Image (cartoon, rainbow, N blue to C red):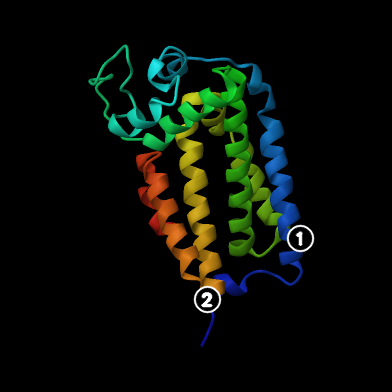
Amino acid sequence: MTQSPLREAVAPGSTRRGPRAAALVAVVAFLSFLPSLRAGFVYDDTLLIDKNPLVHGAHGIISAFAGHFWQTEDLGSQGIGLTYYRPLVTLSFVLNWLAFGGAAWGFHLVNLVLHATAAWLATRIALRWLGQPWLAVLVGVLFAVHPTRSESVVWIAGRTDILMAVFGLLSVELCHLARQSGKAWQRWLGLVCVLAALLCKEGAAVVPVLL
């Protein structure tokens, strides 16, 4: 049976260089936004996190799933009129607060780690689809440092984008592994990641196209 062209695209030796290429891009992604650790809480960060008691303790774990993204103690159930359901993002704020005691740099650090992870996954996928490590690195770096990433990474509330990207790209990676190994649990975990991406931001509806 003929294999998919995408599965045959990886050039000889690129598999060995691939992990190093992806790791390099992840480091570039992390270091590029490292100054954001000093950014503090800005704009919606204050309303959603700093001044929102609903994410200041373990009780917020329940409220993350029971309410909507803009439901804060000050605004009430109406929020700002936008009832986005993004419980995993709110849950990440709660866990972040518990882990770092509400320090803004801790939230920025998590954003950096998530962004580096997304860049790493994007580079791995690019390596398979393009077949050339140098080209995969070029695509990965463009993904990592493109100016449109600034809002998503530096603005804590922009975590919706990078958390969605991590789960979405991870689903692609897991489904690829499932095709290679034939292990059903990898395929099912990949589908769970699709659902997780949707619970971070609505734009994840495009992930099935990648799959």
Amino acid beneath label 2: Ser
Which residue does the numbered mark 1 point to in the structure image? Answer: 17
Q: Are marks 2 and 1 in contact (CB under 8 Å)?
A: no
**Residue at x-position 48% and y-position 55%:** 171
Secondary structure of the residue carrying numbered label 2? loop
Foreground residue among 207 and 137: 207
Secondary structure of the residue carrying numbered label 1? helix
Residue 51 coordinates in the image, percent (x, y): 43, 12
Give above or below for 185 relative to 42: below
Residue 1 coordinates in the image, percent (x, y): 51, 88
Mark 2 or 1, which is nearer the eye?
1
Which residue does the numbered mark 2 point to in the structure image? Answer: 4
Residue 111 coordinates in the image, percent (x, y): 57, 31
Furthest residue toward bottom: 1
Furthest residue toward front: 58
Give above or below for 169 relative to 87: below
Separation (CA) of disc 2 from disc 1: 22 Å
